[in-house]
Amino acid sequence: MSLTNYVPTPKFEEYKELFKEHFVMERRDGIIELRMHTLGGDVQWNFELHRAIWQAFQTVGADPENKVMILTTTGDTWIANIDDSSFSKEEDDRAYYSYEHMYYDGRRMLISLIHDLEIPTIGVIPGPGAHTELALMCDITICSDNAMIVDPHLDLGLVPGDGIHSAFIELLGVKRAAYALLTCEIIDAQKALEYGLVNEVVPRTELSDRAWKIAERVNSRKRTTLRMSVPVIRRPWKQRIVDDLDGGFAMEMHAYMCDSPEHRDDIGTKTYERAEGYEEEDRKKGIRIASK
């Protein structure tokens, strides 16, 4: 008998409760779904969620009962708003927040997604929003037919260096990525499929069912074979992270300290106003008006 014991692995019911302020978690037959939310509705990007994402990825990845992960959001957007009350804290100590919450937490989100989750991941984009790298860097990505993918960093006065650049360069190639990042190009669902950003475009009402159906098919494989397939598939993402993730974040934070932009909820008014199918009130929310 061993002289020591294993440290207990957190149980699903425990971490489901621990992360409930940021995620609604559901698990069936080893398939775990994480739905990001803010106060039960559409996600508002904030420091607290920034940290909770990588903490959740590490926790989910450490639980051997999890076999496939679905990552999505609650509501009809991806991340289309910013919680001004959270980001306003950065003015108290820009140097502290630029490292502790933006550089460290921001990097850990993607590092944990690629390295700590040794199970297949499915990103599900239910509508328009920013920071889609979290879904695009999943092993499989599907989106609704009214989704829009955009990196609004330059429209907001920020360097596009905190992960979306890695996703765009890897999936779009250098020229298309440069255009998308420099012009804050709004890529609709069909163009995202054509460009290879997503695997499938699905009607919004059928999106969740389709994600679970894909997960069930993937989950039908034997456990060890499935888990050992993941590092084979993820090798390009691991190399991409090594090549440019840290540098991109460092450049964004350097420019942030030099030019002192503010993180404010201008995603809708500064970016989505250029998209067809939007009206003024909906631009502020970043919610597309579906064509009838």
Image (cartoon, helix red, strand yellow):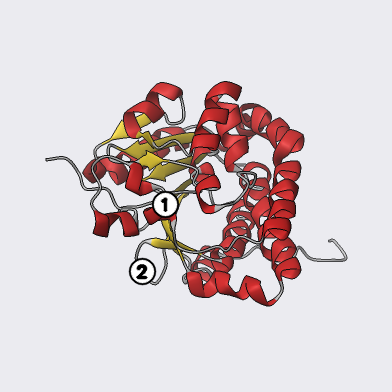
Q: Is residue 197 left or right of residue 164?
A: left
Q: Mark 1 points at which residue?
A: 270
Which image quadrant for residue 56? bottom right
Q: Quadrant of residue 201?
A: top left
- Mark yes or no: residue 224 visible: no
- Left/right placement of residue 115 relative to residue 195 reads right
Identify residue type, mark 2: Gly
Residue 40: numbered disc = 2
Front residue of 187/132: it is 187
Q: Which residue shows up at 67% across the image and 77% down it?
A: 92
Q: What element carries label 1?
A: helix
Assign the N terminus to one quadrant of the image: bottom right
At x 65%, y 54%, the residue is 106
Residue 9 lies, with reference to residue 242, above or below; the image says: below
**Residue 80, position in %: x, y?**
40, 55
Q: Bin the neighbour count of mark 1 within 10 Å (Cα to Cα): few under 14, some 14-19, many 20 and up.
A: some
